[in-house]
Amino acid sequence: MSNMYAIKDHSFENQLFINRIVIAFIIIILLTSGLIARLIYLQIVGNAHYSSLAKDNSIKIVPLVPARGIIYDRKGRVLAENTPSYSLEIIPEQIKDMDDILLRLQKLLDISNEEIEQFQKLRKRQKRFASTPLLLSMTDEELAKFAVVRPYFLGVDIHTQLVRHYPYSDLTAHVVGYVGRINETELKELPIAEYRGSSHIGKLGVENSYENELHGKTGYAEIETNVQARLLNTLNEVNPDPGTNLYLTLDIDLQKTAYEALAGFNGAVVAIDIATGGVLVFVSRPGFDPNPFVVGISNDTYQALQSSENQPLYNRALRGLYPPGSTVKPFVALAGLEYGAINPEQKLYCPGYYQLPGVSHKYRDWKKGGHGSVDLNQALTESCDVYFYRLASMLGIDNMYNFLQKFGFGEKTGIDLMGEKSGLLPSREWKLDKKNQAWYPGETLITGIGQGYLQVTPLQLARATATLANKGKVVTPFLVGNIVNSQGSHQRTGANNNDIPLNQDNINTVINGMINVIHSEHGTAKGINRNISYQIAGKTGTAQVTGIKQGAKYNENNIDFKFRDHALFVSFAPANAPKIAVAVVVENGGHGGSVAAPIAGQVIKQFLQDYHEN
Amino acid sequence: MKIETRREQFEPPSVLGNFLRKLHIDIPLFMALLLASMLSLLVLYSAGSQEMDILVRQASRVGLAFVFMTVLAHIDPYQFKRYATVLFSLGILLLLAVLIMGQIGKGAQRWLDLGIFRFQPSEMIKITTPMMIAWYLAEHPLPPKTKELFIATVLIIIPTLLIAKQPDLGTALLVASSGAGVLFFAGLSWRFMFAIVGTLASLTPIIWHFMHGYQRDRVLTFLNPEADPLGRGYHIIQSKIAIGSGGIYGKGWLGSTQSELDFLPESSTDFIFAVFAEEFGLLGCLGLLTLYLLIIARSLYIASQAQDSFSRLLAGSLAFTFFVYVFVNIGMVVGVLPVVGVPLPLISYGGTSIVTLLAGFGILMSIHTHKKFR
């Protein structure tokens, strides 16, 4: 076969090969001799030195784990702390009859068979002299019971360790997040030395995004131990540097108000301090109890959370994508004014539907029969869809895209949390790229009333509203306001460097329309104007979950709950000197005015009361 | 085949001999491998905190590996030659599959989950790369000319880079050296070898640039382990203490205090030599190295007796790669080479490496026991 290509000289090849075998063997012998020389150096020459290091009294470097930084709310209330937890641990090496000990312990304390099983499993994986936990997070009663009989249980002892605890549980789960055991993938990327001795790492929320600050610097101690690994003497100690304490911009009272106001629904509430960008409320309901994640959540509990229809693990405020519905109208109105597509006094007639020239499809108004002749202010107040269909049509998708983008639609807000969604602001290019289709005029219309492809997160909505209230000064939301460590404190603020150039008359016109939403008798959210001494500017929104057929009628009572419309509301107050911006999304809430607006009303009321008292 | 049967009739009948011949087993190699495997279980028992569990698991893997070796020994080397290209291409495809799946899963991944067991394509490529290169070079007159050298080099670099990307530096190194081994035995000119070494040396800064952070850490730590006693340098320092404290005679079986006290990490896998050296001392180490040299010498002998270029090159490369295995692992444990993830062949705990190793020896046995004429 090889002859097909060239003539082979077999005896020459054979000789060459034998030569190479000999050379290879010589190289192998030489390199092996090198290894042997090294072994002789280590084991004969260095023996005395290394023996003294390894001898009965060995010097061991043990890491000293830093205490994790505490997380507070803006008023110094603890959101994440380290609490001592007591566990009953056994050193298998020191036990003669393990079964007997376990039986006696089971009689004394409330230890389940699963816990015994778990212990046996752990014991197999660990060294015999290693302390192995049997009972975690013991109660005071169990501690007292064991303390009395402790002398009779040699090799069994109580260990104390600091465990992360979240006192507000589900209320802050989506903001503060939680820590959990370091897993294999994380281990690969972590600086090994910094995390020697650490068992937990921030997995979600602020715990995750501020891991570097919260963790602190690991110290170490050089200790002398004897053959049983018992501590004899500490030679040298470098103390750990505790983690940085974080003060969030969040107000836990407001958070609680918003969370409770949302009871019975799934949804999100985000409130932003307009002056700084600090996030005051960041609610995603339902929440979940993060504490089980710290000690190791059981598979059943986790599965239950995972498969729950309400998706408690889903951070709606940060990652939930909703059509903004009519809450986008103030921005579209402003675009219309800025681009000169319309003037505020101009009236457009609304017959209850709108048709594109030459197309039979009727784009309907939410109000059957229509609003009649409306100007911009009325269109906002009554949320007239036809007005905005026409305005969108006049503006065109390109102008709408360019303008809405400036308010942060379609891009991440840059909040200091991981996993934020950027939402979707559709454009011609986007549609061509993703759907390989041209942009249709009808799609411009429905984008103008916040339907169609347009998708926002509640956080984006709050941010856009805050920027509007700030008259074009862009607000960047952030959660951690103050970083405090041994070197002092460091105040953070959102970077407010790019301003949207806006005509102040135009913005005042839009704000006036938004005030009327609450304070005029035709306003869609007039229900929240009672008993308040300030003015709120806002806009209601209703986002369709399912499409409704041409000619069919949407009837809330006939529709399955999960297909009911989402209720939205964006607002800021006081309207003349805005302090707080609030965005509310209530999934399947029905109407923005009746369900979402009161939640924002409560948050605003409480915030302003508190603001004036302090 | 006919000639072989006739020969058998003239040999004195030996039941065991006949049986082993039918099994296509090379007795000296088989015995040495068996001895090493026994030793492995002995050391593992000590290094793994005297856990029967670990021992049983490893023993069953070793058993399986021996069966696999025997199966391969049965296959005529002509078949390896015939399917070299197919097997090599398949290996490359599987490597690509792993890489893509890793990218989708957003993490380093080395194996494919086949349901019953996890399969590491990089292990298969350790054998198929030298097979491919040997097949390619044997098709042409030796020593190889520049064009053949170029193509062979490309064939070596492809799997090496794919594995280095996983990232698995240790295996990449072994695959590269298995290919380089074939080139060496094919009679690669010395001038060319120096040129390659020179090029590699000048490429160092570029390689450094493409290394992962943890790979750089390992190199830096190797250069100065004491700088980071709590982190990366920990392995090397503790390993040297364990070996050095073993002295000439060692502390005896189960006498290792360093692994027992948990000073020595990865004491059952990559750093098992340190436990061995601590317990059995310099004498034990010399014994183990002798055993390794015997295996290598026997393998090289088999290579020298092989009857065609393909078999010779493949056998030579398998023997050479085995040595690289030993040298890199012990070199790293005694602190003369940087820490790359290469286990101590035949001794370290772990299933995949032992199966591949014994597969290689199975092929060697196949080459030795399937001669057409003498």
Image (cartoon, rainbow, N blue to C red):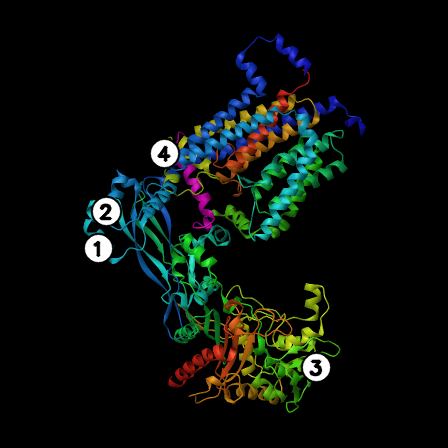
Q: Which SS class for mark 4?
A: loop
Residues under labels 2 and 3: Cα distance?
A: 81 Å
Identified at 54% across, 33% down, the residue is B355
Residue where numbered disc 1 is placed: A144
Mark 1 falls within which chain? A
Q: Which SS class for mark 1?
A: helix
Q: Position of residue B317 (x, y in %)?
A: 63, 31
Amino acid under label 3? Met
Identified at 70% across, 35% down, the residue is B85
Q: Quadrant of the C terminus of chain A?
A: bottom left
Residue where numbered disc 4 is placed: B255
Mark 2 falls within which chain? A
Looking at the rendered structure, whether the residues under marks 3 and 4 are on a common chain is answered as no
Q: Is residue A543 located in the magenta-colored stretch of the structure?
A: no
Residues under labels 2 and 4: Cα distance?
A: 38 Å
Residue where numbered disc 2 is placed: A107
| Magenta span | B226-250
Q: Position of residue A386 (x, y in %)?
A: 64, 82
Amino acid under label 2? Lys
From the viewer's perspective, is the residue at label 3 or at label 4 nearer?
3
Dot 2, how many residues are within 10 Å of its Cα: few (below 14), some (14-19), or many (20+)?
few
Residue where numbered disc 3 is placed: A394
Identified at 56% across, 14% down, the residue is B18
Q: Is residue B237 located in the magenta-colored stretch of the structure?
A: yes
Contact, mark 2 vs mark 3 (Cβ under 8 Å): no
